[in-house]
Image (cartoon, grey):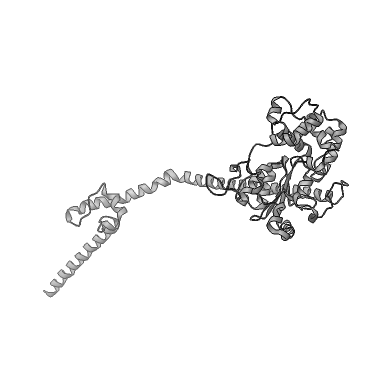
Amino acid sequence: MGTWRGLRVAFILGSLFMILLIIVYWDDVGGFNLYPLQDHKHESLHSDSYPPATTGPSTSASRAQTSSSFPTIASSTSLVPEETGGAPEEHTEEEGKDKQEQRKEETREDEEKERSRIAVNDSEQEARKKRLMDVCSGKDAVEFPGRTRAFDLIPNRELDHLIVDDTHQIIYCYVPKVACTNWKRVMVVLSQSLISPFSGKPYTDPEAVPPDLVHNSSLHLTFSKFWHHYGSLSRHLMALKLQHYTKFLFVRDPFVRLISAFRNKFGRPNEDFYRQFGSVMLRRYGNVSGSLPETAAEAFSAGIKPTFQQFITYLLDPETERESIFNEHWRQVYRLCHPCQVKYDFIGQLETLETDAEHLLKLLGVDHLLRFPSGARNRTATSWERDWFARIPISMRRELYRLYEPDFELFGYPKPDSVLH
């Protein structure tokens, strides 16, 4: 009797154990969802198609049906990317690699072009500076006033074109009719010497600086002002800044610059230049009967204005005081910027203004702060020389060349044979 009871207990325990295994098995494969709040992905997958899971016996059959279909859904969805997306993904990855390699190659080519361009610019700068040194040392046998003069012997009044920016350690010698308006605008931005009436802050964009304001001498610190600022220390400070600062200037074909100056100052009414120079030219060489009009506007209305030949005659007249007639707009560059006393680090040319300006701003380390203004360029070109000098006697042309020969030689401009012969 005891043995029979033991077998019944063992059978009952074994049955319970088997039921427990079945429950665990179905829960593992998805037949039971005993923890619906902990498996949101599982819940959302079944919420639209299947009722909530319960433990009652009435739902056991439906759970069995649900669990038998679940692997089929999973396997079918796993086939989608393999059947429809596998090959395109592999192809896209290859194309992506090709495009990436192409971009790298283009970047390498751009960097190589930039290095080549910089090398060409550096080489050109070295050639320009060497030319300057050769002429100043007397190798080219071109003599001109002040070639061997020491810097300390240059009067302060002749240093008024050397603009100093202490913040960026720059010295710029401006030459009128050689993009000097735009370079002055750059210097105003760098020195923060002009406040914008719109923002109440210093200008940050050179193109926004009014061009008529940049020629106000009070905006720029020049060497000629050092005596008023530093007294007896002025020459010592000049020497230090010349030694350590980056110095640059821009030049232009001397005869083309001369034509440009005449067109700008005498080709249209300009009251100041009419009174100081134009009226003098007309009285001396114009054969004007009676008194001259008092203003430039009246003179131009009457068809009375200086000619280019009268202008050249005025420059060459031996009776004219040399110093007073040479306004800065047509004064020789060697008299404005003293290239034999100031060792310039960069010599730009108007003929290559865009590339030179870009190169210079990088050299100065300010290319991230501003860009050179892209304003309208002066249209006077070398090809105009023959027409402008057509009525000037050959003897006067050659005498004029001797007057500007130092600039031609110093800055490597070819001798204008078509004008001189």
Quadrant, the N terminus: bottom left
Residue lying at 81% horizontally and 37% vertically, measured from the top left: 315
Query: Would residue 414 be found to the left or right of residue 168 on screen?
Result: right
Query: Would residue 162 be found to the left or right of residue 71 on screen?
Result: right
Percent position (x, y) of residue 238? 73, 57
Residue closest to the eye, 45 or 9? 45
Outermost residue toward the front in this view: 291
Quadrant, the C terminus: top right
Outermost residue toward the bottom in this view: 2
Percent position (x, y) of residue 90? 49, 46
Residue lying at 79% horizontally and 37% vertically, measured from the top left: 255
Residue closest to the eye, 172 or 35? 172
Kindly tell me whether residue 24 is visible in this rendering.
yes
Kindly tell me whether residue 308 is visible in this rendering.
no
Residue closest to the eye, 170 or 66? 170
Residue lying at 71% horizontally and 56% vertically, measured from the top left: 227
Query: Would residue 407 be found to the left or right of residue 197 on screen?
Result: right
Percent position (x, y) of residue 27? 26, 58
> To which quarter of the image does residue 312 belong?
top right
Determine whether 59 is above or below 349 in the image.
Answer: below
